[in-house]
Image (cartoon, rainbow, N blue to C red):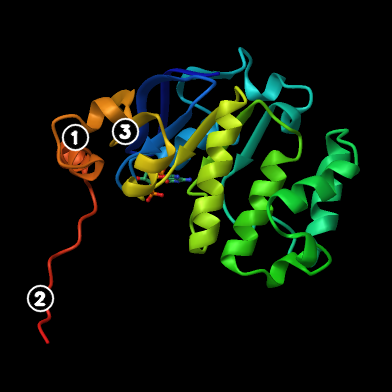
Amino acid sequence: MIEARNLTRRYGPTVAVDALSFDVRPGSVTGFLGPNGSGKSTTMRLILGLDRCDAGQVRVGGRRYRELRWPLREVGALLEAKAFHPGRSARSHLTALAASNAIPRARVDEVLDMVGLTSAAGRRAGKFSLGMGQRLGVAAALLGDPGVLLLDEPVNGLDPEGVRWIRNLLKSLAAQGRTVFVSSHLISEMALTAERLVVIGRGRLLADTTVAELSAGSASLEDAFFRLTSGAVEYQGNQTKEVTS
Ligand SMILES: Nc1ncnc2c1ncn2[C@@H]1O[C@H](COP(=O)(O)OP(=O)(O)OP(=O)(O)O)[C@@H](O)[C@H]1O
């Protein structure tokens, strides 16, 4: 369970996260949606204690992240791909992480197998493709067999097999009773993966609901998302002249 209450983070004049309150419950995948710059990554960093909040608080399993004795065994996180030393092999990266949290070494090979990196385990992680880096990040998140998982854009860079794999993985982790919180810009993918949604815009909560509820009355979840966030989009491209061939 993740409980955010009145969570607020400012960077100078920018209010990145603005009095945000929501719960992420165990047993289902909760998608975290919002336009560019709406505060999703900042919120995830606040949950993980990687950034301090100016007001409010967030608890994971009833405690603040920094109060957790073995954080990797309680919360697994994938924040950005390639968050590892480029000169280390995938296996040695995971082995070092396991040692720091008193996780048995045998678990390293288990998670390498789960993410499909067994054959690349001895290669320098710095030479990994984006998708392989994402897989290694997922392996690190799963290492401590945590009850809570936080993933920021996990499908980024994954091939179609990888997208389907992560979808099924997240659903099965939730079905085991874990709390799974996952951000994405791919609304159609979220429609397939998530049961619940937290939607934010300009740092504020726009909806804390189910996919079914939000989609009801719209042609698609994407349409419902655009309607919900239409007043909260900060960065928008211009339509270019249509190309006809
Ligand atoms: N370290 C920082 N210093 C200054 N401003 C920041 C910092 N981190 C985030 N911001 C600002 O906070 C706001 C929210 O950013 P954040 O990265 O959390 O959004 P996001 O929803 O994850 O965006 P995206 O979908 O584009 O990844 C933005 O205006 C961003 O410029």
Distance CA(mark 2)–CA(mark 1): 27 Å
Distance CA(mark 1)–CA(mark 3): 9 Å
Please, is residue 138 above or below residue 148 in the view?
Answer: below
Which image quarter holds the C terminus?
bottom left
Determine if the C-beta at disc 3 is less than 8 A from ligand 1: yes
* Mark 2 or mark 3: whose residue is earlier in sequence: 3
Counting from the top left corner in percent of width and height, residue 229 is at 20, 38
Q: Do tag 2 and tag 1 residues touch (Cβ < 8 Å)?
A: no
Amino acid found under the numbered disc labelled 3: Ile
Residue position for label 1: 228
Q: Comparing marks 1 and 3, which lies closer to the viewer?
A: 1
Location of residue 100 by image quarter = top right
Report the residue at 62% width, 26% height from top.
Answer: 176
Left or right, 61 with respect to 8, comes to: right
Residue position for label 3: 200
Disc 3 crowd, CA 10 A, few/some/many (<14, 14-19, 20+) = many
Report the residue at 80% width, 50% height from top.
Answer: 94
Q: Nearer the viewer, residue 34 or 91?
A: 91
Counting from the top left corner in percent of width and height, residue 60 is at 59, 20
* Mark 1 residue element: helix
* Mark 2 or mark 1: whose residue is earlier in sequence: 1
* Mark 3 residue element: strand
Residue position for label 2: 242
Q: Can residue 55 be seen in this view?
A: yes
* Mark 1 or mark 3: whose residue is earlier in sequence: 3
Disc 1 crowd, CA 10 A, few/some/many (<14, 14-19, 20+) = some
Report the residue at 19% width, 37% height from top.
Answer: 224
Please, is residue 34 above or below residue 180 in the view?
Answer: below
